[in-house]
Amino acid sequence: MKNIIIVAQIILGIFIVILIAIQQKEGGLSNIFGGGANNFTTRRGIEKYIHILTIVFIAIFIILSILVFRF
């Protein structure tokens, strides 16, 4: 059972990295020091669903992480 949970975590981790990489619009170190523009817009369409899916995958990942210690 523990091996199945660990494999599921690895697969979810890969999907989370991919989903986060898809969401990145502007990157680089300039945003760390305030060089990026702070345009807050509403997510729409597929971007909204990717954002929600990322949150769901992260929640499942956290639950699986807790379950690993249980078994």
Image (cartoon, helix red, strand yellow):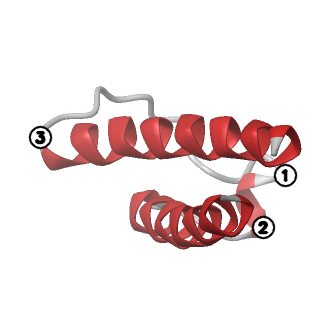
Residue ID for mark 1 = 33
Q: Secondary structure at mark 2?
A: helix
Residue ID for mark 3 = 45
Which amino acid lies under the numbered mark 1 shown in the image of this protein? Phe
With respect to residue 17, does 56 lie above or below?
above
Residue 70 place in picture, x, y as percent: 83, 37
With respect to residue 28, does 58 lie above or below?
above
Which amino acid lies under the numbered mark 2 shown in the image of this protein? Leu
**In terms of depth relative to the viewer, which is nearer, 63 or 33?**
63
Q: Quadrant of residue 3?
A: bottom right
With respect to residue 61, does 16 lie above or below?
below
With respect to residue 21, does 50 lie above or below?
above
Q: Residue at x 81, y 53 (%)?
A: 32
**In terms of depth relative to the viewer, which is nearer, 58 or 8?**
8
Q: Quadrant of residue 60?
A: top right
Q: Residues within 10 Å of mark 1 (few under 14, many from 20)?
A: few
Which amino acid lies under the numbered mark 3 shown in the image of this protein? Gly
Q: Quadrant of the N terminus?
A: bottom right
Q: Earlier in the sequence, mark 2 or mark 3?
A: 2
Residue ID for mark 2 = 29
Q: Earlier in the sequence, mark 3 or mark 1?
A: 1
> Disc 3, disc 1: CB below 8 Å?
no
**Could you tell whether 53 is left or right of 12 in the image?**
left
Q: Secondary structure at mark 1?
A: loop
**In terms of depth relative to the viewer, which is nearer, 65 or 24?**
65
Q: Residue at x 55, y 64 (%)?
A: 8
Residue 61 place in picture, x, y as percent: 62, 47
> Disc 2, disc 1: CB below 8 Å?
yes
Mark 2 to mark 1 CA distance (whole Å): 7 Å
